[in-house]
Amino acid sequence: MTRISWFTVAVLLLAGAVAQAQYRIVSSTTTRNGEFRLTETVVQVGSNPVNRFVMHHVKRHGPACGQRGAVLLLPPLGPDYQFWEFSEDGDFRRSIAAYLADRGFEVFGYENRFRHIPAGACESGAMDCSVMADWGLGTLVQDATFIRGYMSVVRPGVLPVVGGHSAGSAAAMAVLNANPHDYLGAILWEGSLYSARPDVVALNQVWCSVDESMMSSGVVFDGSGAAFAALAHFDLTDPNSPVPFPVPGLPPGVTNHQAFIGFMTAPPPSPTTEPVPGGAFAVGDPIASTLTYADEVRLASSVATFVNYIPIAMARDVNCGLSGRRTFSANLWRFTGPILVIESGRGFDGTVLEGARLTHSSEITVEIQPQFGHSDAWANIDHRRYVERPIRRWLVSLYGR
């Protein structure tokens, strides 16, 4: 079902901070999945057809739905918003979004502008990808501000929580920095825009410089996501065959399984994969090709959904933030609401808590797994224990039972 509803005009009025960018709702489609109602709303920004994003809204059926509160979820760079609605068996009801909606919280989500750009479209010129030069945290904050206006109409009087994983956590910090009074609390999970650690600052000064140099040379996107997705797909479907395409750094004969585990446990240094020294997507043994904590099917199934392109501007803003720039964090001290920090010792390793402490939060709740890599809590077979239940308990403490 497609409809343009009455709230379009209201949202545009409420989102005055971004009205000058010509935000326009072009379609809204609602479907049902069991007891859940899922709405996807496409928003066009200006006239360039590439400049559009999707708002997601998940709600459980029934008159009491959403009365406990509302959450705006921001996506990681790789799987994008699909991360929040993902389950390894394709059952939406087993996703994080469904878990929260099933417990009375209304879930809203942001899907990045680059989510659906087809592989090869930028290199061939089939799409004008030069607009990616502007797709950094500033643009994401503008899009999130529009969604916040939408939420004000759909859930009037409810002060929501904003949260994210990985780059989505860094984006949540940027959103709070821009609009510190618009949110009741924040979920910061494995992503940061600040660190005072000399090793983190030094590494990200290098990557910040690399990002800026690439952009000044006209390179505005990283297309490695498609390769990660392909490796994950072949690991799931044909693990024992050699990798069917050349991969820099891999000797001939390496199997799809070996290559995937190697990249997860020892990711190649790059601006988008290693912002904290010693970090890994997942802890494991690249020689034995085994994972210690992550379920391989769950991890590979998610990586197989990775986007084809990542804007260098987004990586720049995160790397430059961790290098010491305060463009998107200088105003965080104005935020005073409660914060939930979820962090891994082999992932962002304390930098999320550092970022949270830039605020004047009334309470910071910390869930740390020192043995985990960046994705291990989420990809663990017992992920409910490490992710969903701590988030639910914390939300209940904010909104009450």
Image: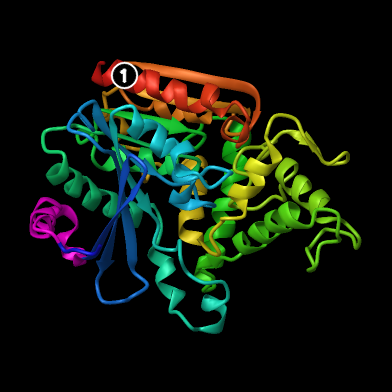
Vertical comparison of 267 with 359: above or below = below
Q: Which residues are magenta?
A: 5-25
Question: Which residue shows up at 90% across the image and 63% down it?
Answer: 252
State whether residue 193 appears in this view.
no
Q: Residue at x 15, y 60 (%)?
A: 19
Q: Nearer the viewer, residue 270 or 126?
A: 126
Among the 4 quarters of the image, the one containing residue 157: top left
- From the image, tell me which residue sits under label 1: 396
Position in image of residue 133 (x %, y %): 43, 67
> Within 10 Å of the Cα at label 1, are there few (<14), some (14-19), or many (20+) other Cα atoms?
some
Q: Quadrant of the N terminus?
A: bottom left
| Residue nearest the observer in this picture, 44 or 133 | 44
Residue 401 screen position, x and y as percent:
26, 16
Residue pictured at 49% horizontal, 30% vertical: 352
Where is residue 69? Give x, y as percent.
24, 29
Label 1 secondary element: helix
Is 43 situated left or right of 257 in this image? left
Residue 105 is one of the magenta-drawn residues: no
Amino acid type at mark 1 = Val
Relative depth, front residue between 80 and 349: 80
Residue 254, how many percent across, how many down?
A: 88, 56
Q: Is residue 390 above or below residue 190?
A: above
Indicate whether 29 appears above or below 217: above
